[in-house]
Image (cartoon, helix red, strand yellow):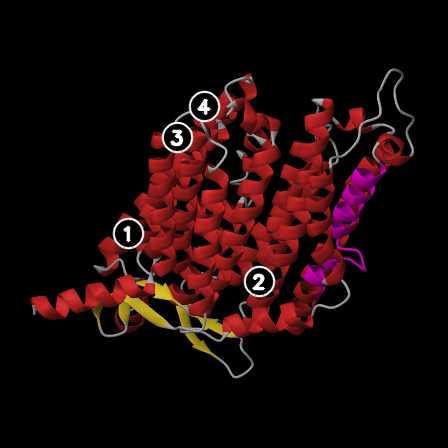
Amino acid sequence: MNTISLQYLVDGLKLIKPEIAVTITLVLIVIVDLIMNKNKRYLPYIFIGGLVVTLYFIVVQFSTSSFAFEFSKNLGMVIVDPFGNFFKILIAGSSIIVILFSVISNEIKEGVDRQGEYYVLMAGMILGMFFMVSSADLILIYVSIELLSLSSYVLAGFSKHALRNSEASLKYVIYGGISSGIMLFGISILYGLTGSTNLYEINSLVQASQVHGFTFVLSGLLIFVAIGFKISAAPFHFWTPDVYEGAPIPITAYLSIASKAAGFALLIRFVKITFIQSVDPNGFWHLLNIIDWKTFIIIISILTMTLGNFAAIWQNNMKRLLAYSSIAHAGYLLLGLAVLSNEGIAAILIYFVVYGFMNLGAFLVVMIISNKLGTEEIDDYDGLGSRAPFLSVALAIFLVSLTGLPPTAGFIGKLYLFLALVDAKMIAVAVIALLNTVVSLYYYVRVLKHIFLNEKAEGTAEFATSVSSVVFIALMLTPVLIFGIYFTPLVDFAKSSIALMGF
């Protein structure tokens, strides 16, 4: 029996090579930081090297569909499948980009003595997100969320030179602690009703024993609260603007992409695995008649996108504007889940890839401008088009893509979401989403007005953009423009990732 248990452990470890690679990278950064105490310049490149190795392991096992750490036949704590691997590639890729952000960020350079801790905490976030996207057990879900959260709390307040960083970190800790407590309460209720924390086993028990009623619904909604907090879904979004504004720009960009991606992957797994009854030949899900997830998610989605877009109109700080924009995009993404079909999930995957490039690109330009001007206020962007034409045009393209206009990749992301809605005959919801897109156009164009139409203030100096920054921005622009015209490989990649265990 012990030999069998040991074999299960060894087999499980073989399936989590990406997580092991991240852990080894974390330890290596700690060791190098201790040995080379005064020289921190090699740390980001060691980190990037570790993530490249991690990406290799993910790609090698991409088509694998199996459980790691099985405690009975076809029941395990970790699911290794193309769906999870898709999100791991997204998280690892965005992590590499954010590390490169950090190398040129003035905010991170100010804390040069603490860069070892900075990269260790980021590795902790990655490890937590990797387990989040692959978890099939409520206990592991909770632990992975806490690993992500504790690291991100500290990183949000990494810069000690600005009061708003400490405020952002404190608010994040308070709100995050409350959401974690609510989730733990929901998990305890669900365990009390079913006697299990495994999502697959809970699904089987619910179908067999008719464990329905208000208490079961309450437990599901309490768990959703914590996940909704992570993805910035209204009404659990209130932490986002303050934290995004107060955190260093690289961390703000990271939270807007990687943390949100992990949250969505977890939400999709939770709804699909726990409440699924069957999947018809057309790929539409039929869920257990316990919680009306379709109506609930539609309401949350419309509330999220509407609140995010209308609140963004009044913002005068670029980071706060992009924070509310991120909330609105969470609303659009929730529509893909509300469809309750494989096509809707494929649309989410497509959207996340293009959203990653265009949102990270926008934050990159904002960071470079902040490095030069020492401000993130939109009014200080007046006349930027003549002072920094390349940065201005790049930011314009990223904002146009965030709006969802052709021929940018943002248009393709929204196109597939709308197609999934139309396919599910959710025409009214699609119209509401389209009207919200029109609202978003207003506040994005407002930024462009300041850049290209307003005259620059007297005494403002010209500034040059470094070659490395130009190359970096060009690398972010390329997929935004290419996927806007030639997107077939991306669509095929997303759809192939849905052909996985349980989907």
Q: Main secondary structure of the magenta part?
A: helix
Which dot, 4 or 1, sits closer to the camera?
A: 4
For the residue pair 371 and 242, the one nearer the viewer reads as 371
Q: Where on the picture, by quarter, is residue 193? A: bottom left
Residue 403 located within the stretch drawn in magenta: yes
**Residue 106 seen:** yes
How far is disc 2 from disc 1 in space, using C-alphas?
A: 26 Å
Tag 3–tag 1 contact (CB < 8 Å): no
Q: Which mark is residue 139?
A: 1
Tag 4–tag 3 contact (CB < 8 Å): no
Task: Tell me if 72 is positioned left or right of 286 in this view.
Answer: left
For the residue pair 175 and 348, the one nearer the viewer reads as 348
Q: Residue at x 68, y 66 (%)?
A: 416
Q: Which mark is residue 113?
A: 4
Which dot, 2 or 4, sits closer to the camera?
A: 4
Residue hosting label 2: 349
For the residue pair 271 and 465, the one nearer the viewer reads as 465
How far is disc 3 from disc 1 in space, using C-alphas?
A: 38 Å
